[in-house]
Image: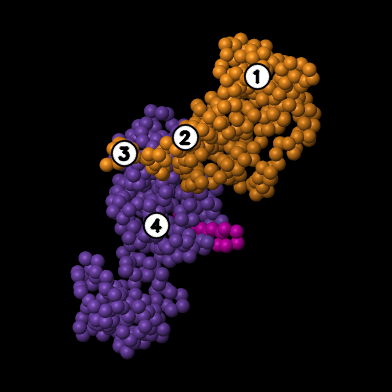
């Protein structure tokens, strides 16, 4: 159990800088999710914390101790890999106990710890099997077990669920979260899946292109995205955005106007979440539906925002039978309008 | 109802083409015929090793074993022509095992270095090793002889083994295998606290065991069948290996060849490789076709 501090951490591969200075403090026992599209540097950042990649600049400290130059084994961390990275020729028992065996722990003690972890993860029956005889979910648990037995002060997860099917992913998501809660170990979890980020994180770090876009609790990021990228990345379906102008708290869209609360003037990017649309036959805005996607619990309608050429999606609760060409009028609560600077993409 | 429909249906192994009736008989006939052709000379050698010298040289040559089996093999094993075959068998065994084990150890370690470590000139070293693939023993035999003679290793096991111990083929093979091992495995081992050699012993080595077995079979036979090199560096009959020893048994000039003993020696020379192949057959095939990762 420890705090993790990143202080202006940078990573360069040759002349190319891939991480441009990340600073954050992770509190003891906190579950932090690093989320971003592929190639944004999130895995590299995690691997730097793990000690698998060197730090080009800046400082990483775990539990108050600078670990920049320490080997992974000396950092008091445990890592769960995307493809589990189980040793194929070892039984589940040996896989879980391997780290302890290297640390020269007495056999009886290893046995005890492995058994305890196996019990926690419901792996007792499989201890003598080889990884290849296990299902994906069980392998995932073994990888977790290998991390748990070492009793590290920080857990590192590198997209641990992306090789599982959708149903198992939901289940493992809950299990991992529950386990981390019970053990109270600080966790750093990398994923590209914003649902995982929303559901698991105490706080999430939204990354894009080697930069941190926003750090905050899932709801903070959802409700007040600090950048255009964070706004569009978090939330499904993603936020509708369009270029428009604002004057005296009035946003003009096509030939209609919508009131907003802002001091900004001139050209801005406006954002509106599909689920924040209020269907209203007298509403100022309308879309012409092109495609409807009934999902059961809600219905997604894709079309163009009338008066503009921007693609627009709205999400309505329940089932709606719509046909192409149908016009849906709606209003929007000014509190749910997000405005972003047209140049920097920062929130206004 | 046709005849074939009455036969019980046997499921063919997956990947094999099912054949019935005439086709099955025909393919078997061809196969048996082929086996007979290959086996016939060996049979003749065996027959020749069980009869007396006059019986061999008087035509027609016998086609069925005689009663001299024990006499001939005893003579071959314990007295031989120049040196007892037992001695040559031991020499060959030491050389073949030495070459096979040595090649495997060296190529495992060099492949490990090439795949898992970053060091200056890594690419160059790999290509140097790779290029030596193109140089057969015969091309470098004179300089090699010079070196071995200079070290005073003529007529020694060291001289028989060391010059043949580096293997570009095996290094290349292990390199290819190591490159298919996921990087995460090495990283997981690092997180678990395994230093490089520990990772090598605990994880890479056991994972390569089928490849090692397959390679051992191939290299053992390679070592066993060495002819030119032992011929060059062993002048003392006590150090003769069996494959070259057979040739040494041939008489020069007007001497009479002791064919039954020579044939018995040939049969004896075949036995160890056959034992190695048969006993390691399962691992051998798994090593060639399996990709257990």
* Lower position in the chain sequence, tag 3 or tag 1: 3
Main SS of residues in magenta? strand
User: Which chain did the image draw in purple?
Assistant: A
In the figure, the shade used to draw chain B is orange
Q: Chain of mark 1?
A: B
- The residue indicated by pointer 1 is B59
- The residue indicated by pointer 4 is A191
Q: Do the residues indicated by labels 2 and 4 lie within the same chain of the protein?
A: no
Q: Do the residues indicated by labels 3 and 1 lie within the same chain of the protein?
A: yes
Where's residue B178, x and y in %? Answer: 54, 43
Residue displayed at 67% across by 17% down:
B57
The magenta segment is: A5-17
Residue B72: quarter of image: top right
Q: Is residue A249 visible?
A: no
Tell me: residue A258, above or below residue A302: below
Where's residue A34, x and y in %? Answer: 41, 58
Q: Chain of mark 4?
A: A
Q: Please tell me the numbered disc located at residue B29.
A: 2
Q: Quadrant of the C terminus of chain A?
A: bottom left
Q: Chain of mark 2?
A: B
**Left or right: A122 as drawn, with respect to B227:** left
Quick one: SS at disc 1? loop
**Left or right: B215 as drawn, with respect to B251:** left
**Left or right: A237 as drawn, with respect to A99:** left
Quick one: SS at disc 4? strand
- Furthest residue toward bottom: A255
Where's residue B292, x and y in %? Answer: 45, 41
- Furthest residue toward top: B71
The label nearer to you, 2 versus 4, is 2
């Amino acid at each position: 159990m420890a705090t993790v501090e990143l202080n202006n951490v940078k990573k360069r591969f040759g002349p190319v800088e891939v991480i441009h200075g990340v600073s954050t403090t992770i509190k003891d026992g906190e579950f932090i999710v690093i989320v971003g599209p592929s190639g944004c540097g999130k895995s590299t950042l995690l691997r730097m914390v793990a000690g698998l990649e060197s730090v080009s600049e800046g400082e990483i400290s775990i539990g108050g101790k600078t670990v920049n130059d320490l080997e992974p084994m000396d950092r008091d961390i445990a890592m769960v890999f995307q493809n589990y990275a189980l040793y194929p020729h070892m039984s589940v028992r040996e896989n879980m106990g391997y780290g302890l065996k290297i640390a020269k722990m007495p056999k009886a003690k290893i046995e005890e710890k492995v058994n305890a972890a196996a019990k926690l993860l419901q792996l007792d029956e499989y201890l003598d099997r080889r990884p290849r005889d296990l299902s994906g979910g069980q392998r995932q648990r073994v990888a977790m077990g290998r991390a748990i037995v070492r009793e590290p002060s920080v857990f590192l997860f590198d997209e641990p669920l992306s090789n599982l099917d959708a149903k198992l992913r939901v289940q493992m998501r809950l299990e991992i979260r529950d386990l981390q809660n019970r053990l109270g170990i600080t966790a750093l979890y990398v994923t590209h899946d914003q649902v995982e980020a929303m559901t698991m994180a105490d706080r999430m770090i939204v990354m894009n292109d080697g930069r941190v876009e926003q750090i905050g609790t899932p709801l903070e990021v959802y409700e007040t995205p600090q950048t255009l990228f964070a706004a569009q990345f978090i939330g499904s379906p993603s936020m509708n955005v369009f270029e428009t102008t604002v004057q005296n708290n009035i946003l003009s869209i096509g030939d209609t106007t919508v009131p907003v609360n802002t001091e900004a003037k001139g050209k801005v990017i406006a954002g509106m979440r599909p689920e924040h649309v209020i269907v209203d036959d007298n509403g100022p805005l309308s879309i012409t539906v092109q495609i409807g996607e009934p999902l059961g619990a809600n219905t997604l309608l894709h079309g163009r925002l009338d008066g503009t050429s921007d693609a627009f999606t709205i999400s309505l609760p329940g089932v709606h039978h719509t046909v192409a060409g149908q016009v849906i009028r709606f209003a929007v609560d000014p509190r749910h309008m997000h405005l972003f600077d047209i140049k920097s993409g920062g929130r206004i | 109802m046709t005849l074939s429909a009455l036969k019980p249906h046997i499921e063919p192994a997956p990947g094999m083409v099912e054949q019935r009736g005439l086709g099955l008989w025909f393919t078997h006939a061809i196969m048996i015929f082929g086996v007979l052709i290959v086996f016939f000379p060996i049979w003749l050698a065996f027959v020749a090793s069980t009869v007396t010298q006059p019986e061999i040289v008087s035509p027609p040559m016998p086609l069925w074993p005689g009663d001299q089996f024990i006499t001939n093999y005893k003579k071959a094993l314990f007295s031989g022509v120049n040196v007892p075959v037992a001695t040559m068998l031991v020499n060959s065994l030491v050389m073949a095992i030495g070459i096979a084990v040595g090649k495997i150890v060296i190529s495992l370690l060099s492949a490990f270095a090439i795949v898992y470590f970053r060091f200056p000139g890594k690419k160059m070293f790999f290509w140097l090793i790779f290029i030596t693939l193109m140089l057969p023993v015969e091309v470098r035999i004179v300089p090699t002889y010079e070196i071995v003679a200079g070290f005073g290793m003529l007529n020694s096991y060291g001289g028989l083994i060391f010059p043949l111990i580096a293997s570009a083929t095996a290094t290349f093979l292990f390199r290819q295998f190591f490159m298919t091992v996921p990087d995460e495995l090495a990283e997981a081992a690092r997180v678990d606290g395994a230093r490089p050699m520990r990772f090598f012993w605990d994880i890479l080595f056991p994972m390569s065991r089928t490849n090692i077995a397959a390679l051992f079979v191939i290299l053992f036979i390679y070592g066993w069948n060495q002819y030119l090199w032992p011929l060059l560096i062993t002048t003392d009959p006590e150090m003769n290996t069996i494959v070259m020893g057979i040739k040494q048994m041939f008489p020069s000039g007007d001497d009479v060849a002791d064919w039954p003993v020579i044939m018995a020696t040939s049969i004896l020379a075949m036995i160890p490789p056959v034992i190695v192949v048969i006993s390691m057959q399962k691992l051998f095939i798994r090593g060639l076709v399996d990709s257990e990762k």
